[in-house]
Image: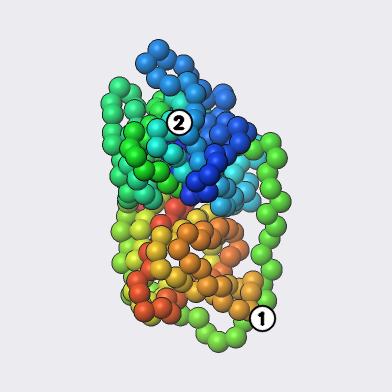
Amino acid sequence: MIWSALLAVLACGPKTKTVPDPAVSAVVPKTELSGSPSAPTETKGIRSVEVLGQIHLNAEFEGFQSDTLMRFRRLTIEPGGVVAQHEHQQRPGVAYILSGTITEHRNGEVRVCHAGDLAYESSGVTHWWTNPSKDEVVAVVVDIVQSEHPPDIGAYHSVQQSGSPPIAHQGLTVTALGQQELSGEFSALKNKILRVRHIDVAPHGTVAFHTHQSRPSFAYLLAGEMSEHRTDRTEAIVHYEGAVVSERNGLGHWWENTSGHNAQFLVVDIVAVETD
């Protein structure tokens, strides 16, 4: 959860001014703040907090007692910036460092995280972050939060398609980065995990056609460019580095790399636990 707050803080932004106080306070919910003589109680030095995607989980799974979102944020933390100590409360998530070096203080231990490192949060985790370096830290955070005012995301509407989409992957290298158990957080997510993968797509590689069903996902383009073909559009969408695609129930699509360079994705989704 702290990572999600940290990631919101780590989003790239203009270097001339910091974000307003409301955005800073949104990094860590007030209900999670936990004071300690040896830990910071104030969040500061947050350059920007960008919400890049939201998925209404009530439309993905049955059994939620309140409106619940899967949220994707990008955070930018200035040199000397701090994310105050907090305890996660039904806000599981994962933070992924895009650039820079950040220090996490958790359960009496100190961990230095670099670009490509992950940090998972679940209920009961108490931690705080600092950026002691001379460079900004940029991170992305995916977390699950309850919301009193969920956005009206709408539904997909299919349009007439031409041609035949690929039915097999080509030129993909998939690396599992880790996972976070969700069963203890929400009854609606029993036997589910938050999964994180890195996908490298070679030039002319393809991600075969598939339809999302109760597998909400965010695909963040770390490098390169990719063309996305969707059942709700007649023309392909070209995505570039820094783009994020929210993949919800009913979305049918496939991807291709038409460039001469490799493309790289960070993919975070909720999936059922695999059983033998």
Question: x, y percentage for residue 200?
Answer: 34, 66
- Please tell me which residue is depicted at 64% across the width and 74% down the height of the picture: 233
Which numbered disc, 1 or 2, marks the residue that appears first in the sequence? 2
- Res 49 visible: yes
Query: Mark 2 — residue?
Result: 83
- Given residues 268 and 3, the one toward you in this image is 3
- Given residues 255 and 29, the one toward you in this image is 29
**Quadrant in the rendering for residue 182:** top left
215 left or right, relative to 178: right
Secondary structure beneath label 2 = strand
- Please tell me which residue is depicted at 41% across the width and 25% down the height of the picture: 126
Q: Are marks 1 and 2 in contact (CB under 8 Å)?
A: no
Question: x, y percentage for residue 176?
Answer: 32, 55
- Given residues 213 and 28, the one toward you in this image is 28
- Please tell me which residue is depicted at 52% across the width and 85% down the height of the picture: 164
Query: Mark 1 — residue?
Result: 160
Question: x, y percentage for residue 51?
Answer: 57, 48
